[in-house]
Amino acid sequence: MTDHDLEALEQRTFRTVTDDGLWDVWIAAFFTMFAVAPLLSETMGDFWSVVIFLPFWLAVYLVIRIVRLRVVNPRVGTVRFGTDRRRRLRKLSIVMLIVNVLAAVLGAVAAIGVQMDWLDLGSGSIGYPLGLGIVVLVGFSGAAHVTGIPRYYLYGLMLAIATLIGEWLWREDLATHHGYPIVFGAAAAVIFIGGIARFMAVLRSHPLPQHPATV
């Protein structure tokens, strides 16, 4: 067996064990905030309309952990990361840290610039949706590269395009809140359905072993 064959086997094994669709569900829960928070901000304010999602995300994460431990792992088993994959995960962490720090710095500069009246981010600016789309696309592309799950590329592209479509809908007076409730709501629904479909496929293809000792 060649090194290429071993790498392909490791990749298939890794995907079999980790690609259960449950992370898709969490991703959908996260981006639900972009759809619902703008509507809640009208009564709760910008800060609390976001903070209220923290317990929701925690609850979804805990449910996913329980389902993975009690439903998925007995069927597909567990896997340890190889040296190459751990190195790729470290690189992804560094890249995402740089991207997030850069996004935070740009956001702070934009906020200060608007307050000081030397930066105009009014209705004619496309900087925020474009920047958000780039950050999302980079993040999902990195995740797709590390995990070897191609649909993460599609998720990133879909979400990046969603920000621009939402901005267009808002400028054409076809939607409120920059179109986020529509485009991110639709994107979250697509990701959620994709995750559930993958989860059901894993359960069908990996029935629970009849003998507990083999788990």
Image: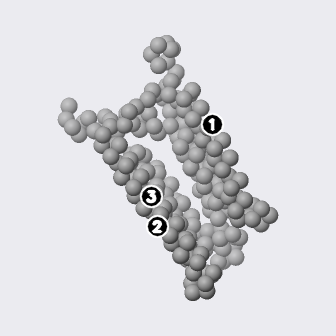
Q: Are marks 2 and 1 in contact (CB under 8 Å)?
A: no
Query: Residue 63 at what x, y percent from top left?
Result: 63, 36
Residue neighbourhood size for the residue with mark 3, other residues' Cα within 10 Å, grouped as few (<14), some (14–19), many (≥20): few
Task: Examine the rendered structure and indicate whether residue 212 appears above or below residue 57.
Answer: above
Q: Is residue 45 left or right of residue 178?
A: right
State the residue position of label 2: 102
User: Which of pointers 2 and 3 lies earlier in the amino acid sequence?
Assistant: 3
- For the point 69% across and 69% down, the residue is 177
The residues bearing labels 2 and 1 have C-alpha atoms spaced at a distance of 32 Å
State the residue position of label 1: 63
Q: Tell me where residue 39 sits by quadrant.
A: bottom right
Residue neighbourhood size for the residue with mark 2, other residues' Cα within 10 Å, grouped as few (<14), some (14–19), many (≥20): few
Front residue of 108/21: it is 108
Q: Residue furthest right?
A: 43
Number of marks present in the image shown: 3
Front residue of 77/176: it is 77
Dot 3 lies on which element?
helix
Q: Tell me where residue 1 sits by quadrant.
A: top left
Task: Examine the rendered structure and indicate whether residue 122 appears above or below residue 210.
Answer: below
